[in-house]
Image: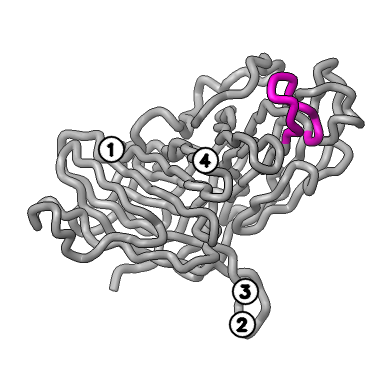
Amino acid sequence: MLTALLATPILGVPPDATSTEVAADQPGAILLFPKIAVDESRDTIVQISNASGKPIFARCFYTAPDEDPLSGEPIWATVDFRIALTQSQPTVWVASAGRPAVPPDRPPELDPGPVPPLAPGFLGELRCIAVNVAEQPISANALVGSATIVDRSRNQLLRYPAISVIGLPGNNRDNTLLLNNVEYSTCPRMLILDHFFDGAVDPVLQLPVRTTLTLVPCSADLERNRPGAALLQFDVFNEFEQRLSASLFVECFADLSLTTISGTAFNAAVQGTLVGQTRIRPIPDGDVATGHGVVGLAEESRGAAGPATAISLHFIPGSLQGDVLVLPPLF
């Protein structure tokens, strides 16, 4: 299920008409899946389609937080693979199973290619980048996708659309992808989440509501396994437009409840209202090599075994600092 929870107006943050926006409803040259989960109770179904009339290739990277065994520094554990799609061709796989090198149910010329299985305990993301037959990144806005997290403990399906980064004419086809409105569209300068406050009781189901927020930095150095990072400012408004604030440093990947971010700002008893709106802003700095944009999604659950829903975030375009995605060289 995918839904926008509230119809709360977005005040004081008009879109920047001069910026190209990432999107969840149109084809792109880069697909970002913020959350892929494989564990004892969850698995993820990944769907990707070629929305164009020409064949398309893609380099894909599963990434998850890890630690360098020598230095103790945070790194990304990366699993990469490649897919090839004919015109208008879809493909699908289950993350824990992957896809065999030669599936028995299709002609070899229509085989998109093998996908490696993920081991239990994986919690991270997936990125796919459109490339040409020589595997050079290209601005072919042909990829669309979605992920469905199967939660067996709740008997729930949480489906969300992949986030598309739009390819632009300035792409020079090297392995350093600039999300700067020249090669690709920028990541948002603000994310907006309409939500129940944690601990609020759903007035229909009479169950307490809890929201989990997943955030992924747009920048990453996949060649050196160095994750992106961002310092985020949270402005939290209740129904009376009273504001509380919080901050969070995200490195590589964050998946945590709103209460973990701030036990005060997201608490229904403190806020005095059931619902609110949170505006999430990356704080720019003087780093000229990489930016600090983020994308993400939210999951809203009711009670210990009640219904759960995936919620897309609203994007406000116009990043103040372009992001950089570095791909590893081909071997």
Front residue of 244 and 41: 41
Q: Earlier in the sequence, mark 2 or mark 1?
A: 2
Q: Nearer the viewer, mark 2 or mark 4?
A: 4
Which residue has dot 2 on it?
69
Categorize mark 1 by other alpha carbons within 10 Å: few (<14), some (14-19), many (20+).
many
Q: Are marks 2 and 3 in contact (CB under 8 Å)?
A: yes
Most common secondary structure along the magenta stretch: loop
Which image quadrant is residue 223 in? Answer: bottom left
Residue at x 31% of width, y 37% of height: 141
Reply above or below: 275 against 224: above
Categorize mark 3 by other alpha carbons within 10 Å: few (<14), some (14-19), many (20+).
few
In space, the residues marked 2 and 1 are separated at their CA atoms by: 39 Å
Which residue has dot 1 on it?
142
Q: Nearer the viewer, mark 3 or mark 4?
A: 4
In space, the residues marked 2 and 4 are separated at their CA atoms by: 37 Å
In space, the residues marked 2 and 3 are separated at their CA atoms by: 6 Å
- Where in the figure is residue 103, as x and y percent of width and height? 18, 59
Q: Which mark is residue 156?
A: 4
Q: Would residue 24 appear left or right of 250 to someone viewing this image? A: left
Which structural element holds mark 4?
Answer: strand
Which residue has dot 3 on it?
67
Can residue 78 be found in the magenta stretch? no
Front residue of 48 and 152: 152
Q: Earlier in the sequence, mark 2 or mark 4?
A: 2
Which structural element holds mark 2?
Answer: loop
Residue type at the position of mark 4: Gln
Q: Would residue 213 appear left or right of 177 to someone viewing this image? A: right
Magenta highlight range: 198-209
Categorize mark 4 by other alpha carbons within 10 Å: few (<14), some (14-19), many (20+).
some
Which structural element holds mark 3?
Answer: strand
In space, the residues marked 1 and 4 are separated at their CA atoms by: 30 Å
Q: Earlier in the sequence, mark 1 or mark 4?
A: 1
